[in-house]
Each structure stands twice: as structure tokens, then as C-alpha cells.
Image (cartoon, rainbow, N blue to C red):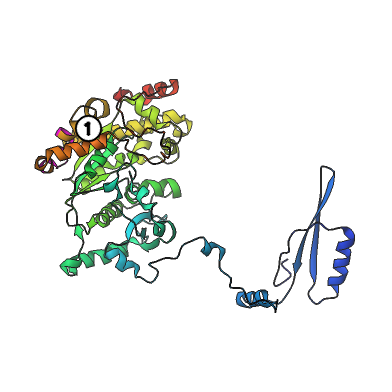
């Protein structure tokens, strides 16, 4: 085909030898020669001939080709062609709007990050943010149906089809300038970080987060992928690109910039912002504590065998990814145990990962005297533990005292519902939460727990 300037591919057809000879003779008289390749394969006693015909013709522009294709039949009007890909998407209702202006006004919100190998190097690497329009307070209406930010993002056609990707540093500069220099009525309120919820996973942090959403003056940002990706940026770059070029100061600034963008609110009633991190982000407690030393923080954990059993259930065992993508802290833990992650079973990798989270939280708690370590079985399941101990610690005592009966009713309603109803489509599935849960502990779970989680048992 390389000898022709404009190849066309015809449909694959089965031809006889006579037909091929006739076609060759006929086309041989034309100025545009044809190359015919015949591939004959015998299968199950049948002979199939597959022919690819390539025709040379003068090089023409796409527009010229479309005009000829759509006007060959003089009896029919030209056909308006439309990209098949474009037909699958809805029109962008904000196409004419300025992207930066939408972000400055708070209409378009940060949805995720994009990192490159040199994003946090000492050079001129950049981090990119993706922005789109979505309702970030759906969890105030129904926290069980919208347990994370990603669940809220998924409800937006604009986020699914028309996200904007922009250099994050340019957005931060534009937003900072807008919030400090614009007319007061146009500025967005920047919320203080009141608390951070860390956890092992399946240990009750969702109950606390959902209880926090019931207060009228709180914003709960739950497991935002941009925060997760900012926190693990250096580990991601190292694991994904085999690069050690990650500036600690740039990393810290990235985390601070992301949380700063997310802290902007146009709701004058909001006074507190809480972050519920994904479980793996617990290894970055020291980093977040360094940036936000005054923010309260909690860490939820659970009986070793039970949390490992739930973490290794099918469709839940994301911890197995840590075999190839460990945090630097987990890699150090593996070295201390003198084990190679590649040699560990799924249950053993997850056990080491979960024990690493507990170790980081315990060390931060013991060395700084900050934070609240919450046992799922011994603390969270106690009657009134949320209202009398956990929520007051997180700075909401004044709100509780203002209307204790209403707070109690709202919290009890949250406690009666499973923290994540996503995926429960059948009315036959029980959405009611119960503390009386029967957790099956297999031999593999028990063995891995004893190997790496002895301190939790």
C-alpha cells in the first residue's frame, strides 16, 4: 500500500479465482492501478478467500472527499455528516462560558487531578486539574446514597462528558486573586478545616461522616479523588514512572492548594469543613497534620480479623493493589518484616497494609498527644458515643447544645441506615444498618492476621 498515495479499503468479500482474474484485467486498463491480495485459509473443509483491494487515487482533502461522497447521487440532496463520537455526547451547555470565570464563581468545581512524571520535580513540571459542574452538597440530602464525592460527580452530565482540564497553578492564582481583590459580595467564603476522619476501612468512619452532614453549618468532603491523588502523588510518581524526582515542598503545596480550592463555599451558613479521607490516605496523617496542626482528627479501626475479612471480600479487596503500588511507609514496613511484597498472598498484602495504617495513626497519636483513636467495637457501637463524645470532640458541642433533641433524632436516623446504599437497587435488599454483624473469618484471614496484625489482636 505504501506505493500509492491515497489508499481505500473495500469491504472484505469472498471471490472466486475467475472473478479475481476478471477484476484484475478490467482494472488494469484504468489509470488508477489496483493491488489485490488474496488470503486463502482452509478451515473445516471450506475455502474462504479474503481480498483487500487498495486503489490509488489523487490525494484530496477531507472536505473534497465528503462533498463527492454526499453528492454522487443527483436525485438526493447532500447528506450532513456528523461525527459518530460527537453523536454519543450531549451538547455542552457551558461551551460559550469562560472556564476560569466559572471556577472563580464556584460554578465549576475540582473533580480530579492529572499527574505527569515531572509534575513535582524541581523543574517546571505541572499538575493539571479537571473541573466540571456538579452539586457537591447532595450528601446533605441523602448521605447514604451519595457517600463520596465521586458518587456526586457521576450524577452530572457535564462531568461525564465535558470536563475542563487546566494547569492547577493557573487556577490557584486566578482564584486567589479573585477572592482577595473582588467585590465582597462576589467572593466565596473560605472554610477552615475543622476535622479529618481517617480509618482502616469498614470501621465506622462512614457513620461519623454521615452524622456530620446532618448539621446545617457543615460541609463534609468525603473521599475526594483529588485529595487522595495529591496526598499519594510522590508515591504514585515513584511507583508508576519509576522516578524519585518529587520535591517535598511542591508536594506539600499541592495538597494545600487542592484543599484550599475545595474549601471555597458560596453558602453563608457553612462554618465547618470536614474531610473524610479514603482508608489508604491514613499513611499521610503526619503530612496533613504538618499543614493543618489545629484541625481535629480521628482514626477508626476494627478487630484485626474482622477488618481483614471485610477488606478481602470480592469487589472490596482494593488493598491487593498495594502489592505493586505501596506507599513508602508500607514499603518500609515490608523491609522491617524482611519480606518481599511480590511473594505475599492477597491476604498477607492486605494485612500488612492495614497494620501500616494503624501503626501510623498510633505513632502520631502517641508522639503529639493529638487525635482520637476510635475502636469500632469498643467505642463507636456504644450508646450515645457519637453525640456525647465524638461529635463534641470534632467541635460541634455548641450545635448539639442549641437543639439536642433534633441532633439526636438526625443522628439516630443516620445510624439506622447503611452508610453506603450505592448499588442496592432491589427493594428486597435490607438498607437498615445493624451493629450485630456476622463476619466470616477464613483460615487465610486468621493466618495473615497473626503474621502482620498481632499488635491489633
Q: Position of residue 60 (x, y in %)?
A: 65, 77
Q: Is residue 178 left or right of residue 30?
A: left
Observer able to see residue 144: yes
Residue occupying image coordinates x 16% and y 35%: 387
Q: Is residue 73 left or right of residue 205?
A: right
Q: Secondary structure at mark 1?
A: strand
Q: Which residues are magenta?
A: 388-398
Q: Picture quarter containing residue 440?
A: top left
Q: Choose between 157 and 306: the one closer to the eye.
A: 157
Q: Position of residue 372 (x, y in %)?
A: 19, 34
Q: Choose between 97 and 74: the one closer to the eye.
A: 74
Observer able to see residue 337: no
Q: Is residue 55 left or right of residue 330?
A: right
User: Quick one: quadrant of the C terminus?
Assistant: top left
Residue occupying image coordinates x 37% and y 54%: 112
Q: Quick check: 226 above or below 370?
A: below
Q: Position of residue 77 (x, y in %)?
A: 64, 77
User: Quick one: quadrant of the N terminus?
Assistant: bottom right
Q: Quick check: 128 above or below 243?
A: below
Q: Quick check: 353 above or below 70?
A: above
Q: Which residue is mark 1?
A: 373
Task: Please rate how many residues cluster around mark 1, counting C-alpha atoms within 10 Å: few if below 14, some from 14 to 19, many from 20.
Answer: some
Magenta stretch: dominant secondary structure: helix
Amino acid at each position: 500500500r505504501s506505493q500509492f498515495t491515497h489508499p481505500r479499503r473495500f469491504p472484505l468479500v469472498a471471490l472466486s479465482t475467475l472473478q479475481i482474474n476478471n477484476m484484475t484485467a478490467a482494472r488494469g486498463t484504468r489509470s488508477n492501478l489496483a493491488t489485490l491480495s488474496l488470503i486463502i485459509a482452509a478451515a473445516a473443509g471450506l475455502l474462504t478467500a479474503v481480498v483487500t483491494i487498495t486503489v490509488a487515487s489523487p490525494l484530496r482533502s477531507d472536505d473534497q472527499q465528503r462533498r463527492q461522497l454526499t453528492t454522487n447521487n443527483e436525485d438526493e440532496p447532500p447528506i450532513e455528516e456528523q461525527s459518530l463520537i460527537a453523536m454519543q455526547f450531549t451538547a455542552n451547555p457551558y461551551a460559550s462560558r469562560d472556564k476560569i470565570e466559572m471556577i472563580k464563581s464556584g460554578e465549576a468545581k475540582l473533580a480530579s487531578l492529572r499527574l505527569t512524571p515531572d509534575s513535582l520535580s524541581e523543574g517546571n513540571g505541572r499538575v493539571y486539574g479537571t473541573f466540571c459542574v456538579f452539586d457537591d452538597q447532595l450528601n446533605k440530602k441523602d448521605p447514604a446514597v451519595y457517600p463520596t464525592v465521586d458518587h456526586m460527580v457521576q450524577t452530572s452530565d457535564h462531568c461525564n462528558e465535558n470536563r475542563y482540564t487546566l494547569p492547577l497553578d493557573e487556577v490557584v492564582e486566578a482564584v486567589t486573586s479573585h477572592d482577595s481583590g473582588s467585590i465582597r459580595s462576589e467572593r466565596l467564603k473560605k472554610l477552615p478545616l475543622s476535622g479529618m476522619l481517617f480509618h482502616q476501612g469498614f470501621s465506622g468512619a462512614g457513620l461519623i461522616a454521615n452524622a456530620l452532614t446532618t448539621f446545617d453549618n457543615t460541609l463534609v468532603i468525603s473521599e475526594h479523588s483529588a485529595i487522595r491523588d495529591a496526598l499519594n502523588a510522590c508515591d504514585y510518581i515513584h511507583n508508576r514512572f519509576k522516578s524519585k524526582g518529587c520535591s517535598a515542598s511542591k508536594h506539600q503545596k499541592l495538597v494545600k492548594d487542592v484543599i484550599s480550592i475545595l474549601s471555597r463555599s458560596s453558602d453563608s451558613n457553612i462554618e465547618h469543613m470536614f474531610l473524610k479521607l479514603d482508608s489508604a490516605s491514613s499513611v499521610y496523617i503526619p503530612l496533613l497534620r504538618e499543614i493543618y496542626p489545629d484541625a481535629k482528627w480521628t482514626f477508626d479501626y476494627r478487630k484485626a480479623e474482622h477488618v481483614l475479612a471485610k477488606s478481602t471480600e470480592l469487589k472490596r479487596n482494593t488493598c491487593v493493589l498495594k502489592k505493586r503500588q505501596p506507599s513508602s511507609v508500607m514499603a518500609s514496613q515490608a523491609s522491617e518484616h524482611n519480606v518481599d511484597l511480590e511473594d505475599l498472598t492477597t491476604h498477607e498484602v492486605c494485612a500488612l497494609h492495614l497494620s501500616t495504617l494503624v501503626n501510623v495513626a498510633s505513632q502520631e497519636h502517641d508522639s503529639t498527644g493529638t487525635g482520637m483513636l476510635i475502636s469500632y467495637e469498643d467505642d463507636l457501637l456504644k450508646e450515645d458515643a457519637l453525640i456525647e463524645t465524638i461529635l463534641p470532640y470534632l467541635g460541634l458541642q455548641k450545635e448539639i447544645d442549641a437543639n439536642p433533641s433534633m441532633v439526636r433524632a438526625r443522628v439516630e436516623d443516620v445510624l439506622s441506615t447503611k452508610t453506603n446504599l450505592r448499588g442496592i437497587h432491589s427493594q428486597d435488599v435490607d438498607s437498615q444498618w445493624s451493629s450485630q454483624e456476622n463476619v466470616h473469618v477464613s483460615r487465610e484471614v486468621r493466618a495473615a492476621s497473626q503474621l502482620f496484625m498481632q499488635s491489633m489482636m
